Amino acid sequence: MIAIYYFYFQGMTISQNGENTMKKDVRAYCIRSIFATLTAILVLATTLTFTACEEKGGGDTFTDPRDSKTYKTVKIGEQVWMAENLNFDAGYGSVCYGENYNVYMNETSEYVKLSDSEIQTNCKKYGRLYNIEAAKKACPKGWHLPNDKEWEILANFAGGANQAAKKLKSSSGWNGEENGSDAFGFVALPGGVIDYEYNGEFDRYEESFWGIGRVGCWWGDSKDEPMCARIYGDYNYAGDGNLANTGGRSGFCSIRCVQN
């Protein structure tokens, strides 16, 4: 807008026969008009920005000094969350979806091995999956693994467990018609999990990935039993669209760090 007004100001013509005072008056008027217009634009832009921040919680970014990865952040109520799953390589206990273990395909009931490119694509989009030991130390300085109370505060702010999932889910990426409204900019993606699956033989289980596109799971730190906040898509047995808390130390889930 400044360039446009600048061009307009420079393009004005004033009669050669006009008095100097007229030139000064015209220039002064133009300057006042430009200043008033720019002030109005600034006020309008500030108002629109403030309104958008109220609705979406405001957005910012955080760069993890450990690996220089940058994450979007969002303020929801009084909490500041990462708006992306953590993708920090914590060593043992953290993997990308499809790394080291087979992937269970719900459509065919088969176990398959993903290619390296597929694994890296999953990691970039969904972040890494962590076991509870790695999860407890994975968040960067100034952030921490949310406890069950903090998950409860988030769920209540978003309408309660039965309503929160729809509002926290991303507006794309979920299978079928299970996308959410992403009302607060939390962008909950269905990054899947690693669970210990029974393989058909007595008392034998094996680790496998499953649920990408269908379920999102995020660790919570609890003094008693570690909990996992899960948002389900089309798994009716879990309560379609609910934010469910499930306990247990086994398996791998995503991480959403919350600011201290």
Image (cartoon, helix red, strand yellow):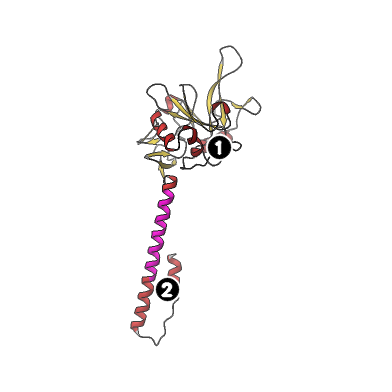
> What residue does disc 1 label?
121
Q: Residue at x 42, y 51 (%)?
A: 51
Asked if the stretch drawn in magenta spans residue 34, the answer is yes
**Element under disc 1:** helix
Q: Dot 1 surroundings within 10 Å: few (below 14), some, or many (20 or more)?
A: some
Please state the horizontal and vertical placement of residue 46, each as a whole percent of the image.
Answer: 39, 56
Segment colored magenta: 33-53
Judged from this view, the residue extending furthest toward the left is 21
Image position of 186 (left or right of 108): left
Would you identify the image quadrant in which residue 111 lies? top right
Q: Residue at x 55, y 35 (%)?
A: 122
Q: Find out whether the residues at labels 2 and 1 contact each other: C-beta distance under 8 Å.
A: no
Please state the horizontal and vertical placement of residue 156, each as a whole percent of the image.
Answer: 42, 35
Q: What's under tag 2, amino acid-wise?
A: Phe
Please state the horizontal and vertical placement of residue 228, each as a whole percent of the image.
Answer: 46, 27
> What residue does disc 2 label?
9
Observer-side mark, 2 or 1, equals 2
Q: Dot 2 surroundings within 10 Å: few (below 14), some, or many (20 or more)?
A: some
Quadrant position of the N terminus in the picture: bottom left
Would you identify the image quadrant in which residue 260 lies? top left
Q: Nearer the viewer, residue 189 or 89?
A: 189
Asked if the stretch drawn in magenta spans residue 231, the answer is no
